[in-house]
Image (cartoon, helix red, strand yellow):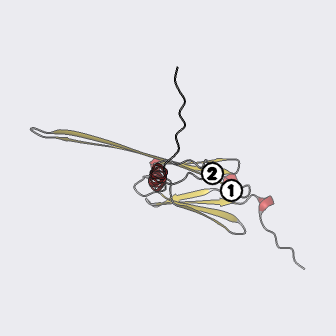
Amino acid sequence: MFDVIERKKSAEVDRFRREVDRMFQEFLDRFPVLPMTGSRRASSVPVSALRETEDEFTMTAELPGMRAEDVEVYLAGRTITINARKQEEKEETGEFVRRQERSYESLTHSLELPAAVDVEGIRATFDGRVLEIRLPKARRNRIQIIPK
């Protein structure tokens, strides 16, 4: 049978544990926190902004290196989602060299809009770097000024 021996923490072990915790936290802080889940991932999250006027929302997202055919935009209820996927393959062949490289990049960003939008009026433009989506508010959500 085993004897149970109680061990007291030494100040040195406690200091070491705190230092390791601090190092891991500094490492994890370098990665973005996904807005919807709060989880950390090493994948890309686009820099985005949402502006609101009386008649519409305008969402912009920076997607450098992506092409228009790499980007998809979905609207489900009041949640707008941007998906972008890029795949590249490079191959070099020479007399003594054969090299093949593949890279994949994927990102997803979802945002819940504060009000319903008019689906038929949605317009998107992409200039090779910035995606701009104009989402007109649904008629019932527009601000109406009532004359005095």
CA gap between label 2 and label 1 equals: 7 Å
Circle 2 packing at 10 Å, graded few (<14), some (14-19), many (20+), is some
Marks 2 & 1, CB-CB < 8 Å contact: yes
Q: Position of residue 113 (x, y in %)?
A: 68, 56
Q: Which mark is residue 44?
A: none
Q: Quick one: SS at disc 1?
A: loop
- Local secondary structure at mark 2: strand
Q: Which residue shows up at 71% across the image and 55% down it?
A: 118
- Quadrant of residue 145 within the rendered picture: bottom right
Q: Position of residue 105 (x, y in %)?
A: 42, 46
> Mark 1, residues whose alpha carbon is within 10 Å: few (<14), some, or many (≥20)?
some
Q: Residue furthest right?
A: 148
Q: Residue 8 vs residue 23: left or right?
A: right
- From this view, report whether residue 25 is shown above or below residue 58: above
Residue type at numbered disc 1: Leu
Pick the residue in front: 66 or 138: 66
- Of the residues under marks 2 and 1, which one precedes in the sequence? 2
Q: Where is residue 12 drawn, in percent x and y? A: 45, 52
- Who's the residue at 14% across and 39% down the image? 97
**Number of callouts:** 2
Residue at figure coordinates x 68%, y 52% from the top left = 119
Say if residue 90 shows up in the picture. Answer: yes
- 142 in relation to 87, above or below: below
Q: Is residue 101 left or right of residue 19?
A: left
Which label sits on residue 80?
Answer: 2
Q: Residue furthest top?
A: 1
Q: Amino acid at mark 2?
A: Ile
Q: Is residue 44 visible?
A: no
* Residue drawn at point x = 21 percent, y = 40 percent: 99
Instruction: Give the residue furthest to the bottom.
Output: 148
Mark 1 sits on what residue? 113
